[in-house]
Image (cartoon, helix red, strand yellow):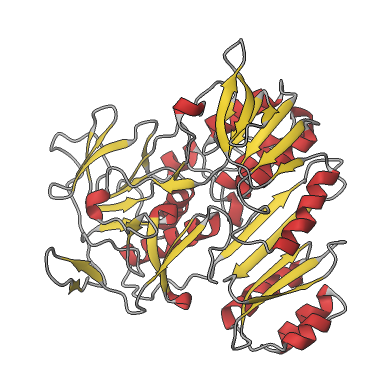
Amino acid sequence: MASAAASQCYSYSSSPAAWALRQGGGGAARVVRLPSRRRFSVAAAGGGYDNENREYVIVGGGNAAGYAARTFVEHGMADGRLCIVSKEPVPPYERPALTKGYLFPPEKKPARLPGFHTCVGSGGQRQTTEWYKENGIEVLYEDPVVAFDGKTQTLKTSSGKMLKYGSLIISTGCEASRLPAKIGGNLPGVHYIRDVADADSLVSSLGKAKKIVVIGGGYIGMEVAAAACDWNLDTTIIFPEDHIMPRLFTPSLAKKYEELYQQNGVKFIKGALIDKLEAGSDGRVSSAVLKDGSIVEADTVIVGIGAKPAVSPFEAVGVNSQVGGIEVDSLFRTSVPGIFAIGDVAAFPLKMYNRIARVEHVDHARKSAHHCVETLLTSQTKAYDYLPYFYSRVFEYEGSSRKVWWQFYGDNVGETVEVGNFDPKIATFWIDSDSRLKGVFLESGISEEFGLLPQLAKSQPIVDKAKLKAAASVEDALDIARSAL
């Protein structure tokens, strides 16, 4: 059964291979062929608008925006031309740090800004506030866009600023899914993590906490629970599925990780739903009440139950009803000429698997940003051909008995073959009915082994399942797969 690779991060729907944008009402959809290159420009001064740089405007200040800015600079097209409109008070940064190194205790040298501004995550220059100024990029901080008019090519921000754009890149990312306020989702001590302010608030709570509950068994749940172990906190993870990371991990693979977490003192409550969060006499969260009536005490709760694409106020541009997000073609063009969408919010053609997908991951944010800006600034017409990639790094704090770093490439469909005993390595191969390797997962590999994974997932070689199952080690299994390339 086809499933989404990695919890809360990968959704898709079936779609014809040939890309077409459809519009029209009441009758059959008609195909709209977009030009390979269309350029817009607006005057740099006058008109009563509040942004000086108007040729290119990026809405959203996350990872994708930072990498897009770098690409504009590389083409010499940023100075005096590019404006970024962000709801955050700081320039774009590498968001994965928030649930990893940022949550370490103060004595363990936690990650802090400006240390992880983009584009250090891919080995690039650290783009601080000064970098944007030096490169002539206008950044409007803490002033999200609340209204959009495609006919006049204008935007309105929360402070009332009116902005003009020539070409627009929507890079609004996702918002954390929240528990309803009526069941305690907004109580003091209940945390959601999407930005630095959220992480700062959680760190403050962790420093005072004794018992924490993590709601959700996906990325957020696993990474926050691992960080909590470094604070020596009583930690419980609650989720409705049968095992952690259900969208990627097989039951057998999940069991290995659950055992590791249990060895670090983490408790699991599986197959459980939250009925409500209750407050103590001080008004702060004090417990989680489950649907079966069970009560789990907690002075801090972290909710990681997924995210939803932040499409407002751009719904009119075209939202994909199946995967959510702004629908784009393989060059990240929307149905409206001159408007693009990138990163988590983009619903794009996943070429190698012949479907429309929305990928919530830093790797796609980086690559989609680069591809989009290349399209906008050059005559590039090469389709975005993305290979799904996910990873996690946990228990990396000083004194950890076991650091965890896994990577996955490809599609988790078909029969699985697991090799290794998790001491220290384990690999899982997904093989379809034609014996083609569709996806591969590796824990604790060396750099050469991790480097092999994308080659395998991209090439999808025909492999000998019997030989893989008989492999004496992860190394042997990877050699068998390599020989099929």
- Residue 429 location, quadrant: bottom right
Residue 224 visible in the snapshot: no
Please name whichever residue, 197 or 272, is drawn nearer the observer in this view of the structure: 272
Q: Disc count in the image? A: 0
User: Taking 468 as reference, is 12 above or below it?
Assistant: above
Q: Give the residue displayed 61% in from the left and 85% down from the top.
A: 436
User: Taking 126 as reference, is 156 above or below it?
Assistant: above
For the N terminus, the image quarter is: bottom right
User: Taking 431 as reference, is 445 above or below it?
Assistant: above
- Residue 28 location, quadrant: bottom left
- Tell whether 441 sits left or right of 329: right
Residue 62 visible in the snapshot: yes
Residue 329, position as x, y percentages in the image:
32, 68
Q: Residue furthest top?
A: 281
For the C terminus, the image quarter is: bottom right
Q: Residue furthest front?
A: 292
Please name whichever residue, 267 or 344, is drawn nearer the observer in this view of the structure: 267
Please name whichever residue, 282 or 18, is drawn nearer the observer in this view of the structure: 282
Residue 219, position as x, y percentages in the image:
62, 49
User: Taking 351 as reference, is 365 above or below it?
Assistant: above
Residue 347, position as x, y percentages in the image:
38, 61
Residue 47, position as x, y percentages in the image:
12, 38
Q: Give the residue displayed 41% in from the left and 46% down from the top.
A: 135
- Tell whether 152 sits left or right of 359: left
